[in-house]
Image (cartoon, grey):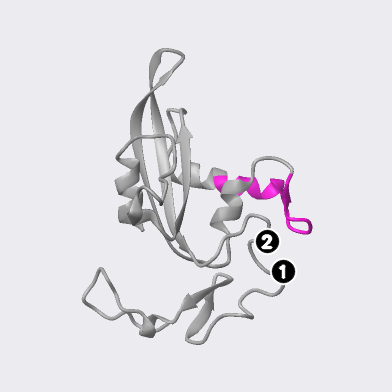
Amino acid sequence: MEGLAEKWVDRCVSRKPDPSIYKDYAGTAQVLIVSHKSQTTFTKTISAVKEEAQHYEYRDNTCTGECDFYKQIIWANLTEVGCAMKTCVTYVQRKVTPANVVVCVYKIAQRIDDMKPYEEGESCTKCPPQHRCVRNQCEEHLEQVESKNSAYTLPEF
């Protein structure tokens, strides 16, 4: 997913990829954030998405302000995520302006806009077999995961 995020952010465009045109993005969803603040960092940009939580009302699944990015990131069936950031040149009011573009690409089993992003209740009570609860999220048990980036086995905690 990180590779797909890097591939898209390298284009320096302010729109998300259309999976019907860009086939690599089929079965994914994306978050794209453009910031013109000079002191923006990756961490600050992603943290801003977390702040959208205050605008989300779980009970009736509505936003009182901007919260679409937040709803996408917390979606329960999100299975993989990768993000990338790049400083790009943009034109704002006929003036060349640097902008930080952050793209996150994630696999999601299902996303329907009128559905709630998760079920209310105690965390991790519906984790699938071979998963454990880590930071209130279901995580595949490390012994069951094949590492794509390393040749060693991680110790069990």
Residue beneath the point at 78% across and 59% down: 59
Between residue 93 and residue 97, name the one nearer to us: 93
Residue ID at (69%, 75%): 122
Give yes or no for residue 58 being in the magenta stretch. Answer: yes
Extreme residue in the right direction: 59
Q: Position of residue 34 (x, y in %)?
A: 46, 35
Q: Nearer the viewer, mark 2 or mark 1?
A: 2
Q: Quadrant of the N terminus?
A: bottom left
* Location of mark 1 (residue): 120
Q: Quadrant of residue 23?
A: bottom left
The residue shown at (46%, 28%) is 36
Residue 116 is tagged as 2
Q: What range of the chain is rendered magenta?
A: 49-63
In screen coordinates, is 156 left or right of 78?
A: left
Is residue 53 on the magenta stretch? yes
Mark 2 Cα shell of 10 Å, populated few (<14), some (14-19), many (≥20): some
Picture coordinates of residue 116, whole percent (x, y): 68, 61
Q: x%, y% of residue 68?
A: 61, 47
- Rounded to the nearest angstrom, the CA distance separating label 2 from label 1 is 9 Å
Residue 141 sits above or below residue 7 on the image: below
Question: In the rendered structure, are the residues bearing label 2 and label 1 in contact, judged by CB atoms less than 8 Å apart?
Answer: yes
User: Camera-side residue: 61 or 130?
Assistant: 61
User: Helix, strand, or loop for circle 1?
Assistant: loop
Whether residue 93 is situated above or below residue 31 in the rendered picture = above
Quarter-of-image position of residue 153:
bottom left
Residue 98 as seen in the image, left or right of residue 72 = left
Q: Residues within 10 Å of mark 1 (few under 14, many from 20)?
A: few
Residue 151 spot, x, y in % from top left = 21, 76
Which residue is at the far front?
Answer: 20
Q: How many marks?
A: 2
Asked if residue 38 is positioned above or below residue 75 in the image, the reply reads above
| Three-letter amino acid code at the position of disc 2 | Lys
